[in-house]
Amino acid sequence: MRVERFLSDSRLWERRYADLWSIPHFISGALVAYVVLRLGFDFQSGFGISFAIALTWELFEKITSLSDTEYFTNNLTDILFALLGYSSFFYLYQSLTSVRAFTLAAVLLVVFAVSVIVGWISYHYYRRYII
C-alpha cells in the first residue's frame, strides 16, 4: 500500500539537509512573521524572535528523543528554513491587503497542522516498525 510505504519511509523525513520536515519549519517561520508584523515589530526584531524560536525548538529536539535519528546538518537547515519562511512572508506581507495576509496565514496554518500530523504519524510508524 502506498500510504504505508510513504509513512514508513524515514528517508523522506530524516535527510541530511532538507526533508519533509523542512515544510513545517518554513511555514512556522512564515507564521511567526505574520504574528510579529501584526504586533508591530520591525524586520530585525522579528527575525531575532524567529531565530530564537527555531533554535529553541531544535535544542528541545536534541534534549528529547525527537531527533535521535536527525543529522546535525538537518538541525541547522531547519533553522535556516524557518528564517527563510520568516523573511519570505515578511516581504510578501508588504504587498498584501490585511485580508489576504490573514487568509494566507490561515492557509499556512492548516498546511502546517496537516504536515506536522502526517509527519508525527510517520515518525511513530517508522520508529515502531522499522527502527
Image (spheres, rainbow, N blue to C red):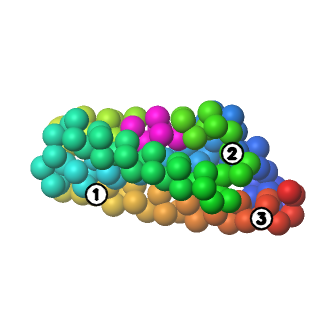
Image coordinates of residue 14 in percent, x first then y, are 70, 45
Q: What distance separates the C-alpha of mark 2 from that of mark 3?
A: 16 Å
Quarter of the image holding residue 48? top left
Judge left or right: residue 61 versus residue 44: right
- Please name the residue that numbered disc 2 is placed on: 70
Rendered position, 110 above or below 87: below
Say which element carries label 2: loop
Residue name at image x 86 percent, y 63 percent: 129
Q: CA distance from mark 1 to mark 3?
A: 33 Å
Residue under the image location 79 percent in, 61 percent down: 127
- Tell me where the magenta segment starts and ends, as one range: 78-83
Q: Nearer the viewer, mark 2 or mark 1?
A: 2
**Mark closer to the chain start, 2 or 3:** 2
In the rendered picture of this protein, how many numbered marks are placed on residues? 3
Disc 2 and disc 1: Cα gap in Å? Answer: 33 Å
Q: Are the residues tagged 2 and 1 within 8 Å (C-beta)?
A: no
Q: Are marks 2 and 3 in contact (CB under 8 Å)?
A: no
Residue in front for this viewpoint, 76 or 84: 76
Q: Dot 3 corresponds to which residue?
A: 125
* Towards the viewer: 104 or 51: 51
Element marked by disc 1: helix
Residue behind mark 1: 103
Q: Earlier in the sequence, mark 1 or mark 3?
A: 1
**Which of the two marks, 2 or 3, is nearer to us in this view?**
2
Relative placement, left or right, of 42 versus 7 is left
Q: Could you say whether the residue bearing mark 3 is in a helix, strand or loop?
A: helix
Image quarter of residue 110: bottom left
